[in-house]
């Protein structure tokens, strides 16, 4: 289905009525099998799926609201956008695409996530994702994310086995700004602001230094700028980033790594930026 | 050693009853069952018997027993429909069926099951005064008498889960001398299994090329203050279970289909998984197929009716890796199927692609 007019209130898709997805019986609200465009106001109540042969394009200025529902009673909202085909989010700096909670008083985990899992491709430009469990999760898929603002989520941006490009984005006021597992696939993470999260960067497991993460700004993360998972035993190259200070001791103290917990990998942060860079998404 | 191992001696009355059952089965004729050969290496083993048990806990006694194997090692065992654990005994030689549990239908299908027999020395137990509260288990893993490296020995508390997963305790991989040691074992009754997987993974089904041993004297009692030393003769898994040759029992739901690549070609050597949770991979699968055959065919019997989420991949355990074949059932948008009691669903076809390979 193509070319729905602005102001459409409903999910644009081929409906798969009476079908449920989660064991919790969260309904599959829509199934996108062809080439579909969203624009204007879109609401998702349940699960919207872009199948392997589907392609969803979301136009600049679109607002996608996820209705709050907790079918399995785990405290995490169950509305979600699941992508196994192609996702194009075509926001602009002036007219970003907004993914948000439909609640009158929104809170983190009101809805589940944008989940790109074994998808064909994802390209996201200038989007705001807020009040989800994970703003964006991407697995087994190549994807490019530029100008993403992910805020008020549990995980701001989460990836695993995914050679993603994450650039010029803002991850803020999440539990984890970026959470990742390389698992044999390196990512490119550059020019991002990761601030005011509990943990800035969470390397969970099987991160082997395949990714390039530089020229990012990590500061004001309340517990640690970098946290190593309990089974992350490999050192992590993270040079050429700004860590909120130019003092070496303060930088090291902002890492929960092998220096603090023997057996964990260490953050290889040198050389580091001595001055706070000016980045595209600076607040 | 006599035909009966120590565990079996305790259940002699049950064996006698089974023998009567066997005779009745022979008289009836025409039932499903198993047949095959007992060999040691390439030599036939005459005079051995194959026993069918209801579970992997052989202390409960066999449900049925074959007549002695012929001069060429051939045996035949009629069995009523059901699921069985098979083992063969010939004097000091013994073998566990690597395809357990074997499913028998009431059709005329007779599944070919071969047994590669090995000698199984009884466990050697000695008292260790300095150990009061715990037991020690040690031993050696052998293949045709030669010590084997990188074999892991797992201890399970029961057989309820088909000895899947890592077990209650697990040894470090054996060294070049084939030996292992598990210290500080709480006293108790354990099932010992030894495996060396070509995949290098710690979990997953035993596949062609893997080495495997189910300890003959399972369940083994390890008493506090004792050290037990065992010998584990391994056998090499020679072929995958023939998923086409074994039909499914009545009552349990099942599904089957074909796995292909995106070009439509059959994908051989892939496992199909059925999960109860939509987040496949975060939980242990409820059921798992043998690897697909050259036609990409598979079949899975499910533990119970209900909704299952279906996927396929090369490996098992952990997450799919770059380059690994991986895919979901795409017949429904959420990759699920729902089966009722006794329902058999066909054409649950799956397309796999290599992860992150354009």
Image (tube, coloured by chain):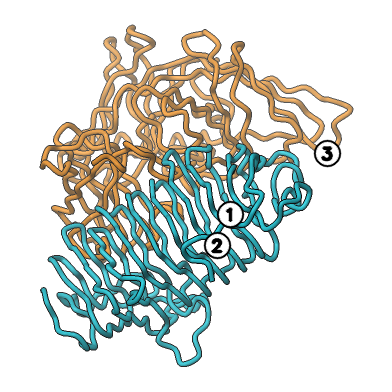
Secondary structure, mark 3, is loop
On screen, B216 above or below B179? below
User: Which numbered circle lies on residue A177?
Assistant: 2
x and y percent of residue B237 in the render? 37, 24
Q: Is residue B25 left or right of residue B12?
A: left
Q: Nearer the viewer, residue B73 or B202?
A: B202
Secondary structure, mark 2, is strand
Q: Choose mark 2 or mark 1, whichever is in front.
A: 2
Q: Quadrant of the N terminus of chain A?
A: bottom left
What residue is disc 1 on? Answer: A202
Residue at 54% over, 61% down: A193
Q: Choose mark 2 or mark 3, whichever is in front.
A: 2
Q: Are marks 2 and 3 in contact (CB under 8 Å)?
A: no
Task: Report the Cα–Cα distance between label 2 and label 1.
Answer: 8 Å
- The tint chain A carries is cyan
Q: Residues within 10 Å of mark 3 (few under 14, many from 20)?
A: few
Q: Are marks 3 and 1 in contact (CB under 8 Å)?
A: no
**Can residue B189 be spotted in the picture?**
no
Residue at 41% over, 46% down: A161
x and y percent of residue A174 in the render? 56, 69
Which corner quadrant of the image does residue B305 belong to?
bottom left
x and y percent of residue A104 in the render? 46, 92
What residue is disc 3 on? Answer: B133
- The tint chain B carries is orange
Task: Report the Cα–Cα distance between label 2 and label 3.
Answer: 48 Å
């Amino acid at each position: 289905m193509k070319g729905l007019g602005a102001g459409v209130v409903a999910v644009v898709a081929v409906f798969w009525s009476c079908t449920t997805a989660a064991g919790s019986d969260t309904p599959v609200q829509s199934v996108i099998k062809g080439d579909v465009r969203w624009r204007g106001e879109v609401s998702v109540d349940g699960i919207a799926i872009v199948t392997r042969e589907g392609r969803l394009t979301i136009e600049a200025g679109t607002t996608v609201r996820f209705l709050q529902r907790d079918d399995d009673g785990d405290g995490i909202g169950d509305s979600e956008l699941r992508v196994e085909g192609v996702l194009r989010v075509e926001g602009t700096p002036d007219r970003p695409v907004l993914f948000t909670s439909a609640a009158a008083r929104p809170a983190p985990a009101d809805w589940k996530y944008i989940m790109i899992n074994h998808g064909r491709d994802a390209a996201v430009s200038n989007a705001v994702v807020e009040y989800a469990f994970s703003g964006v999760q991407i697995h087994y898929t190549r994807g490019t994310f530029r100008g993403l603002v992910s805020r008020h989520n549990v995980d701001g941006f989460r990836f695993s086995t995914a050679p993603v490009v994450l650039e010029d984005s803002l991850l803020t006021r999440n539990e984890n700004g970026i959470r990742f597992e390389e698992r044999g696939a390196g990512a490119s993470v550059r020019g991002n602001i990761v601030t005011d999260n509990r943990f800035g960067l969470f390397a969970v497991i099987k991160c082997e230094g395949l990714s390039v993460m530089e020229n990012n700004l990590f500061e004001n993360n309340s517990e640690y700028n970098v946290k190593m998972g309990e089974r992350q035993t490999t050192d992590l190259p993270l040079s050429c980033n700004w860590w909120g200070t130019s003092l070496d001791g303060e930088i090291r103290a902002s890492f929960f790594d092998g220096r603090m917990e023997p057996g964990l990998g260490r953050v290889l942060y040198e050389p580091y930026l001595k001055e706070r860079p000016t980045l595209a998404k600076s607040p | 050693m006599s035909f009966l191992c120590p565990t079996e001696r305790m259940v002699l009355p049950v064996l006698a009853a089974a023998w009567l059952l066997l005779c009745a089965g022979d008289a009836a004729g025409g039932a499903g069952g198993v047949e095959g050969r007992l060999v040691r290496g390439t030599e036939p083993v005459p005079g051995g018997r194959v026993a069918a048990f209801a579970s992997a806990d052989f202390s409960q006694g066999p449900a049925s027993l074959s007549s002695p194997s012929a001069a060429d090692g051939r045996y035949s065992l009629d069995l009523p429909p059901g699921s069985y654990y098979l083992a063969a005994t010939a004097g000091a030689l013994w073998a566990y069926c690597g395809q357990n549990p074997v499913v028998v239908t009431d059709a005329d299908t007779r599944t070919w099951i071969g047994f590669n027999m090995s000698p199984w020395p009884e466990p050697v137990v000695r008292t260790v005064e300095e150990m009061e509260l715990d037991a020690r288990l040690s031993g050696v893993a052998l293949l045709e008498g030669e010590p084997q490296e990188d074999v892991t020995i797992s201890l399970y508390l029961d057989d309820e889960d088909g000895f899947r997963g890592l077990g209650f305790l697990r040894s470090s991989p054996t060294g070049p001398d084939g030996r292992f040691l598990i210290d500080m074992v709480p006293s108790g009754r354990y099932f010992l299994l030894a495996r060396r997987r070509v995949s290098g993974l710690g979990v997953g089904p035993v596949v062609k090329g893997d080495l495997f041993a189910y300890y003959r004297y399972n369940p083994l009692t390890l008493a506090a203050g004792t050290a037990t030393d065992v010998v584990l003769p391994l056998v090499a898994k020679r072929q995958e279970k023939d998923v086409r040759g074994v039909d499914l029992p009545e009552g349990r739901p099942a599904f089957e289909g074909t796995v292909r690549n995106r070009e439509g070609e059959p994908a051989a050597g892939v496992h199909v998984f059925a999960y109860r949770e939509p987040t496949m991979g975060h939980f242990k699968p409820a059921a798992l197929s043998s690897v697909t055959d050259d036609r990409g065919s598979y079949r899975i019997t499910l533990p119970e009716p209900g909704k299952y989420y279906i996927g396929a991949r090369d490996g098992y355990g952990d997450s799919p890796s770059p380059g690994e074949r991986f895919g979901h059932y795409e017949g429904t948008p959420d990759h699920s199927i729902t089966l009722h009691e006794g329902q058999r669903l066909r054409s649950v076809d799956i397309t796999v692609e290599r992860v992150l390979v354009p």
